[in-house]
Image (spheres, grey):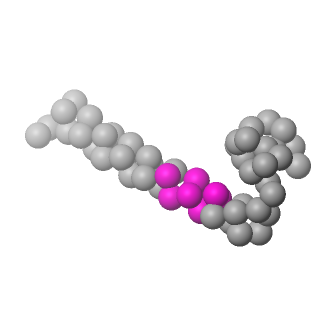
Amino acid sequence: MTGVYADLRVAMIQRDRLTENLKRIKNRMHHWFDRYFPEYSTVFKHWEGKASCTL
């Protein structure tokens, strides 16, 4: 494949890799919060939220 289709294929592969990496990072964050701050999930619904990130 050449041209636009090859670029599209490469972009899709890269997107899949980034999506998998993001899943891994989120799972690690949940693991560490559960391990070191077990009460965190009762105080904040989402660790990515604005209130949580201001801490």
Q: Residue at x 36, y 46 (%)?
A: 16
Q: Which x, y percent locates residue 41?
A: 74, 51
Give the prevailing secondary structure in the magenta stretch. Answer: helix
Q: Is residue 9 left or right of residue 40?
A: left
Location of the N terminus (image quadrant): top left
Placement of 39 over or under 6, stated as above or below: below
Q: Is residue 30 left or right of residue 47?
A: left
Q: Nearer the viewer, residue 54 or 38?
A: 38
Q: Residue at x 44, y 47 (%)?
A: 19
Q: Nearer the viewer, residue 41 or 10?
A: 41
Q: Does residue 55 appear anywhere in the picture?
A: yes
Q: Magenta region: which residues?
A: 23-30
Q: Which x, y percent locates residue 7?
A: 26, 37
Q: Is residue 38 left or right of residue 27?
A: right
Residue found at the very far left of the displayed protein: 1
Residue 25 colored in magenta in the image: yes
Q: Residue at x 65, y 59 (%)?
A: 29
Q: How many marks?
A: 0
Placement of 26 over or under 10, stated as above or below: below
Residue found at the very far top of the displayed protein: 4
Q: Nearer the viewer, residue 15 or 53?
A: 53
Q: In which quarter of the view is residue 51 placed?
A: top right
Residue 21 colored in magenta in the image: no
Q: In which quarter of the view is residue 38 placed?
A: bottom right
Q: Residue at x 64, y 58 (%)?
A: 30
Q: Does residue 53 appear anywhere in the picture?
A: no
Q: Which x, y percent locates residue 5?
A: 19, 33
Residue found at the very far bottom of the displayed protein: 35
Q: Which x, y percent locates residue 13?
A: 30, 46
Q: Is residue 31 left or right of residue 39?
A: left
